[in-house]
């Protein structure tokens, strides 16, 4: 794709080319992410001020901005330094005062000449029983009333920037806005009654009432859609390139799958069966699979992923399963090893810990094809790791993979299918924004026999009762996790909290029954502590961080989360999902420090009310917003100027289907509408898409 279209050059020129902007203001604007005139067009007013003309300040709900014609009366210069300068003015029904602080007398006399008429617009308020207007925003002769906007837009500011400077710069940027050819499906534009792009931008910057500043205003809806559409085009292009790359059909024979099924102590859920068949269909096609598998805690994602790996092996290839941390990689190994042995499948793990001869031996076996499934961390994708025939890569992902990483990953095998698993249910809007290039399978039911976990909120003041409860659970042969609070960012103080809790619990419950795991421990000690808990030698496991607890212990039926208010909702839900994995009733105790903040209270109550991870994810999104939910910088999530991920899911859905439809009809964007869409991609700074078009 050739360079930026010439029609956009003025919008991407330096900010200093705009009226009233010098180097210093250009520097200041960077704090608002404004780097070019184009960005000023996307910086919309956040509110507005009603300056409609009225004949008197009487009856106005003060304090508020009023605009009134007045007759100018007596000037009252201050008698002593530091006092305000006052001018009596009369509107149609009453007299009030215009007030100036630190003002020079001749300036005020020139501004408000006694005996003449002027229109004042500014904030009027009561002070000492009379109405005052300190420093009016506008003072104009009656014939110049049109100089005062009836509704004045208010823009977001940053230190060192005024509304006046910003409004002047935006007006200057608006003069450069050309008419673009339309990139939206014309039928859609008519149905939604949307104006052209140019008209929408102009209308959004010249609101006439509060309704025009709302996200629901037609002009803003159109611009939000344009942002979504550009972003979804990028994802659709990435998907198209993946689809164009020749895949290698992997058709399973069913032999390994049926031997594993026969060995399972339970029947897979309908949701699991459906996901397995979707994956099997994808893998059998001649283009690459690009699928997201999302499910709630304990919905059985690992089993589905294992079946996907088995299909690759049945077809004569190999599979890789990649986890974000070493502990999770080893956990996958342990949970899948018995099933692999049943089917006679060779499973190995490769992490950063493998060195020297041991690593070399694994790599040689992998290259020969003797290892069927390789489980590991990012180490799986180092240069010297060569597969004999890698058919599928399963990524157990925790928001660490953007679109670009997914594209790079596919380059490891000649035609590798990609299955991304996410353990946190993702709200629909974020799923479309982040994984819009993928097909999605959802596991929305729990395996039979899983009992819901009862959740209770208990104040830290009642710690003694909790201790007694644990004692009786242990006497009945149960086990318990005790997660310590996140004290602050430093692991050291987290550690102190855990060690103190560990000592206190040992004093109450006995030395041999309590184990401890934390991030500072040497790996061997950590593994030993986990192993002792898994084997049932220790009854209570005190742990600092979430990830350390990523194990499956069916006999653990109590999860205590201390200072639960310091954790995020998704994190609490993940932690709770560590119990309830056996056939016994399980409990999660949320210990909180009173008094709770309003959001802390809401978080814990939502958790108490529901075990549904998808509902929890939606609440989490509404409470925290998309950026906080997954840390935008890491997530490959777009930053939108106007579009609102949380509240405009419907617009995003339409944009996604429109983007896919356009590319299906015009894969290289060469038609008139395709060319217009290219201009949109350049305007919206979708560099990734532009790169993809030139690559594709």
Image (cartoon, rainbow, N blue to C red):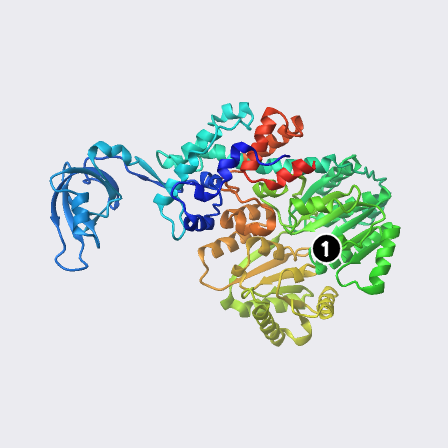
Mark 1 surroundings: few (<14), some (14-19) or many (≥20) residues within 10 A: some
Residue of label 1: 378
Q: Residue at x 58, y 40 (%)?
A: 686
Q: Position of residue 515 (x, y in %)?
A: 67, 70
Q: Position of residue 658 (x, y in %)?
A: 59, 30
Nearer to the camera, 72 or 307: 72
Q: Is residue 141 left or right of residue 671?
A: left
Nearer to the camera, 219 or 446: 219
Residue 660 appears in the rendering: yes
Q: Position of residue 557 (x, y in %)?
A: 65, 60
* Rendered view: 405 above or below 506: above
Q: Residue at x 36, y 47 (%)?
A: 162
Q: Quadrant of the C terminus?
A: top right
Res 245 quadrant in image:
top right
Nearer to the camera, 202 or 160: 160
Q: Position of residue 43 (x, y in %)?
A: 45, 41
Q: Quadrant of the N terminus?
A: top right
Secondary element at tag 1 = helix
Residue 97 appears in the rendering: no
* Rendered view: 118 above or below 330: above
Q: Residue at x 85, y 53 (%)?
A: 366
């Amino acid at each position: 794709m050739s360079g930026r279209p010439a029609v956009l050059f003025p919008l991407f020129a330096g900010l200093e080319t705009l009226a009233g902007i010098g180097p210093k203001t250009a520097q200041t604007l960077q704090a608002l992410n404004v780097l070019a005139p184009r960005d000023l067009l996307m910086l919309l007013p956040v509110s507005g001020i009603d300056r409609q003309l009225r004949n008197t300040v009487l009856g106005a709900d003060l304090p508020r901005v009023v605009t009134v014609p007045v007759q100018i009366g007596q000037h009252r210069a201050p008698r002593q330094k530091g006092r305000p300068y006052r001018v009596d003015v009369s509107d149609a029904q009453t007299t009030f005062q215009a007030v100036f602080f630190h003002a020079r007398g001749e300036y005020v006399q020139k501004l408000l000449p006694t005996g003449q008429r002027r229109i004042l617009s500014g904030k009027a308020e009561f002070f000492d029983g009379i109405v005052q207007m300190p420093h009016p925003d506008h003072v104009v002769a009656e014939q110049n009333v049109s100089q005062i906007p009836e509704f004045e837009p208010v823009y977001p500011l940053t230190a060192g920037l005024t509304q006046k400077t910003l409004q002047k710069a935006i007006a200057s940027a608006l003069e450069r806005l050309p008419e673009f050819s339309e990139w939206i499906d014309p039928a859609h534009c008519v149905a939604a009654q949307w104006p052209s792009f140019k008209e929408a931008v102009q209308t959004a910057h010249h609101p006439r009432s509060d309704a025009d500043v709302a996200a629901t205003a037609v002009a803003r809806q159109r611009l939000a859609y344009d942002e979504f559409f550009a972003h979804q085009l990028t994802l659709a292009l990435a998907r198209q390139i993946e689809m164009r790359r020749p895949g290698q059909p992997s058709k399973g024979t069913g032999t390994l799958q049926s031997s594993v099924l026969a060995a399972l102590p339970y029947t897979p859920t309908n949701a699991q069966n459906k996901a397995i068949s979707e994956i099997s269909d994808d893998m059998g096609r001649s283009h690459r699979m690009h699928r997201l598998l999302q499910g709630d805690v304990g919905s059985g994602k690992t089993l589905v992923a294992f079946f996907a790996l088995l299909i690759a092996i049945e077809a004569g290839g190999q599979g890789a399963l990649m986890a974000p941390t070493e502990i999770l990689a080893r956990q996958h190994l342990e949970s899948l090893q018995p099933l692999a042995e049943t089917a006679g499948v060779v499973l190995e793990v490769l992490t950063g810990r493998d060195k020297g001869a041991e690593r070399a031996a694994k790599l040689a076996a992998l290259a020969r094809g003797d290892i069927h499934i390789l489980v590991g961390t990012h180490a799986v994708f180092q240069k010297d790791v060569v597969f004999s025939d890698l058919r599928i890569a399963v990524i157990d992902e925790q928001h660490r993979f953007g679109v670009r990483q997914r594209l790079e990953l596919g380059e490891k095998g000649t035609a590798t299918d990609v299955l991304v698993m996410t353990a946190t249910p993702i709200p629909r809007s974020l799923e479309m924004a982040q994984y819009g290039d993928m097909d999605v399978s959802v596991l929305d039911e729990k395996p039979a026999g899983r009992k819901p976990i009862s959740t209770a909120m208990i104040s830290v003041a009642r710690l003694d009762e909790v201790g007694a409860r644990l004692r009786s659970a242990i006497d009945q042969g149960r086990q318990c996790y005790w997660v310590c609070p996140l004290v602050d960012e430093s692991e050291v103080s987290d550690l102190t909290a855990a060690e103190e809790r560990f000592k206190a619990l040992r004093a109450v419950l006995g030395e041999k029954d309590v184990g401890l795991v934390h991030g500072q421990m040497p790996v061997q000690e950590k593994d030993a502590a986990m192993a002792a808990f898994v084997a049932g030698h220790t009854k209570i496991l005190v742990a600092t961080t979430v990830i350390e607890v990523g194990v499956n212990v069916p006999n653990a039926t109590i999860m205590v989360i201390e200072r639960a208010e310091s954790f995020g909702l998704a994190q609490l839900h993940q932690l709770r999902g560590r119990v309830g994995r056996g056939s016994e009733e399980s409990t999660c105790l949320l210990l909180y420090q009173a008094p709770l903040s309003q959001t802390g209270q809401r978080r814990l109550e939502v958790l108490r009310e529901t075990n549904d991870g998808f509902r929890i994810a939606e609440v989490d999104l509404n409470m925290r917003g998309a950026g906080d939910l997954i840390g935008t910088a890491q997530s490959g999530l777009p930053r939108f100027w106007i579009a609102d991920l949380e509240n405009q899911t419907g617009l995003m859905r339409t944009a996604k289907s429109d983007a896919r439809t356009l590319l299906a009809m015009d894969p290289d964007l060469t038609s008139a509408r395709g060319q217009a869409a290219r201009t949109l991609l350049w305007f919206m700074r979708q560099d990734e898409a532009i790169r993809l078009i030139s690559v594709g």
